Image (cartoon, rainbow, N blue to C red):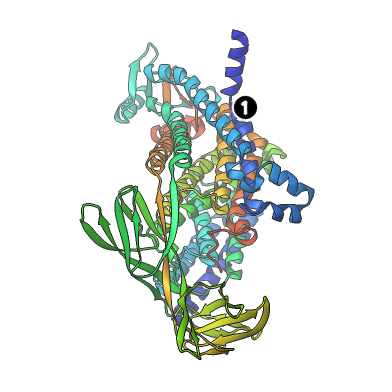
Amino acid sequence: MRKILLKTHKFLSSLGFAIVLLILIAAFIVIGTVIPQHLDASYYLERYGSFGKLIVAADLDTAYSSPIFMVLAALFTINLVLCTFRSLKGQLSFSRRSFSTVGEAGGIHVHQVDCKSAQQYFTNKRYTIEKTEEGFRASTYTWGVWGATIVHIGIIIIMIGGVIGAATAQESSMNLLPGNEIYFDDKGFSLRLDDFSMTFTDTGTVSQYVSDVTITDDDGSSFSRSMWVNNPLSHKGVKLYQASYGWANNLKIVDRDSQTIVKEGYMLNNSSYFHQDSHLSVYLYRYYPELGIGGNQQPINLSERERNPHYAVTLYQFGNPVESYIIGPHETIPFENLDITFTDSQAYTGLLFRSDSSFIVVSIGFVFIILGMIISFYFYPRSVVYGKETLTTYSRKNNWVYAQSIAKQLHGVVRTPHGKD
Amino acid sequence: MEMLAYAENLTFTIAFFLYVGTGLLFLLYLTKLSVKVEKPAVAASIGGLTFHTAAMVLRTIGAGRLPLSNQYEFAMSFAWGIVVCFLVIYAIYRFAAIGAFVFPLTMLVMGYAAMQSKAIKPLMPALQSYWLTFHVGTAILSYGAFALACAIAVIFLIDAKRNEGKRILKDPQISDILTYRVIAFGQLMLTIVIISGAIWAQKAWSRYWAWDPKETWSLITWIIYAVYLHLRLRRNWRGKAAAWFAIIGFVSVIFTFVGVNILLPSLHSYTA
C-alpha cells in the first residue's frame, strides 16, 4: 500500500506529468478560441453536425468552465504543489551550504588566471570565499536557488485567486438615463446618474464615454464623480465600470380624434411596441444619430453625433408588415386614427458593477512570478573553484556564458565544454 | 500633417531598403565569400535602425502618441524590437552570422507592416491608458527576442548537419546556449506583457482574465516556452529538440500576433 502511495506521489509530482498536463491544457484552451462560446445548443448541432453533439456533451461550448478543464487545472495545481514541496528539501540544503559544484557541463575550466587577483576579484564581487589547500572556492547568489519555487508559488496563488474569483465574484449591469437612481441594498448605498455624455474626435468616432454619478451612503454622506472607460469607480467593495451605451428613443402615439396621448415612453433599438386596439406593432429597427447613405444605397449611421437624426420604423398589423419609414424627430406617421412620432432620443449609459475580491490575491501571485523569474534567470547560484592554477566555474544555468564573462574579467582563457580552446 | 506622413513613409522605406541591404551583406558573409562585409553589414543595420527609429518618431509626432496601437504600428515596432535585440546580442557576442537569418525575418515583418492601413486613427476609449505603452512596449521586446531565438535555432539546425569547418557558428553548443538565454529574456518580457494586460483589463474591462483569444494565445505561447525552459534545465534537452521547440514557440508568437487578429473575433482587434 505504502509502495503504491509513494509511486502515485512520485508520478503526480513528476516533471513528466507536469509537461503532459501543460501540453493538454494548451491544446484544450485552443478549443475555446476556435469553437464559438456560450451559444445555444441548437447552434452547435446545426453547424457541426454529429461533432456538435460532442461539443454540447463535453461542455466545449463553455470550454473554460467545463469539467474537463477543471480537472486539468486541478491536476496541474496538485502537480505544482507536490513538485514544489518535493524540491523544497534539496533547495533548503543547497541554500544552507555555502558551496556547491553542481553544474552544467560539469564545470568549465578557465586557464591562465592568477590566484591572488582572482580571489581579489571575487571578494570585490561579494562572493562568499573559503580558502582551500590548493587555492580557494567562492560562491554567490546561493539564495537564487529559490527562483523557480517563487514562480511556482506565484502560479499556485493565482490558481487559488481564480477559484476565489469564480466562487465569490458578483457582476451585474444596468442601463441608466440621467436622473435614474439605483440602490444597492446589500452594500448600503445608492447611485444616481447625473449626466452621461460622449466626446468625439474630429472624424466623429467616440473618444470617450463619461458618466457623472453621485453616490449616497445610508448615513447620508455623498460624493460626486465622473467615470469613464479605464477609469472605474470603487466604493464599498464594488467596482463600477463604464461598459456600454445606447439610445433611448421617445415614442409618442396620439389619437387624432380625441387628441389624447395613447402612449408615450422610451423604446430601445430593435424593439417593438404593440398597440392592442388597432392590433398595431410599431417596430423601431434603429435610431440613426447621423444618417448617411451607404455604398449599396442602404441607410447607415455615420457617427453618434446627433447631426442628422432619423428613425427606421416598420409598422405591422395582425403580424403583417404594412409599411417602412425613415423619419426625422417629430415627423408623423399617420395610421388609421393614430399619429405616430418619435420626438427625441437620449443617450443612456451602461454601467457594470462587479465585486471581485480575488484580484488582490492574484496580484500577489503576479509579483511572485515576476520576482521569481528575475531571480531564476539572472540571479541563479554560481560558484568557482581555484586549484592547480585553473579556475573552474560551476552553474546550473548559462555556465558557458558565466565562464566567458569571468575569463574576460580576469584575462583568462576558457576551455569550451567540448574540451577545445 | 501631410509632410509628416510623407517623411514617415520616406524614412520607413529607406529603413526597409537598408535592411534589405543588411540582409544581403550578411548572406554574403554567411557564404564565406567575404568576411570583410561584416562591418559594412552592421553599419547598414545601424543605419536602417536609425531611419526606422526616425519613422517611429515621426509617427509619434503625427499621432500625438507612441506608435503602438494598430497592426501597422505594432508590426513596425515589432521589427524594430527584432533589430534592437539582434544588435544587443551582436554587441555582446559578435556573432554576425545571425544577421543573415534575422534580417529576412525583419523584412517580412516590415513588409507586413507596409501592407497594413497607415491611417492615423484616434485611440478608442479602451486604449486610452498609460498601460498601453508598458503593455505593448514589453510585447515588442518579447516578440523581438523570440524572433531572434528562432533565427538562432534555425542556425543550430543547419549547423547540426554540417562538419565543423562548414558551420555557421563554430560551436553549436553556443547557439543552443544563446537560444536559451534569449528565450529566457523573451519569456520574462512575455510574462510582464500578460500580467500588465491583466491589470489593465481589470481597469478597462472589469476582469483581469476573460479568455479573450489574444489572452489565450499569449498564454499558449507562454506555456510552450515554459515547457522548453523546464525540459532544457531539468531534462537536459539540448540540441535539435530544443531548437525545434524554439521555432514552434515563434510560430505561436506569430499566430498570436497575426492569426488571432485575422481569424478569431477578439477584444484585441483594434485594426478595424
For badge 1, the amino acid type reads Gly
Query: Does residue A108 appear anywhere in the picture?
Result: no
**Rendered residue at 57%/40% (across/down):** B223
Q: Is residue B125 above or below residue B5?
A: above
Query: Does residue A285 appear anywhere in the picture?
Result: yes
Q: Is residue A200 above or below residue A255?
A: above
Residue B28, position as x, y percentages in the image: 64, 56
Q: As rendered, which of A180 and A22 lies closer to the eye?
A: A180
Q: Is residue A389 above or below residue B223?
A: above
**Rendered residue at 55%/85% (across/down):** A292
Is B271 placed left or right of A352 in the picture?
A: right
Q: As rendered, which of B198 and A307 lies closer to the eye?
A: A307
Residue A24, position as x, y percentages in the image: 64, 37
**Rendered residue at 50%/51% (across/down):** B85
- Please give the chain letter of the residue carrying mark 1: A
Number of callouts: 1
Residue bearing the label numbered 1 = A16
Q: Is residue B242 above or below residue B141?
A: above
Mark 1 residue element: helix
In the rendered image, the quadrant that contains the N terminus of chain A is top right
Q: Few, some or many C-alpha atoms within 10 Å of disc 1 (few <14, some 14-19, many ≥20)?
A: few
- Locate residue A69: give its quadrant: top right
Residue B31, position as x, y percentages in the image: 67, 52
**Rendered residue at 39%/71% (across/down):** B64
- Locate residue A360: give its quadrant: top left
Is A59 placed left or right of A263 in the picture?
A: right
Q: As rendered, which of B22 and A155 lies closer to the eye?
A: A155
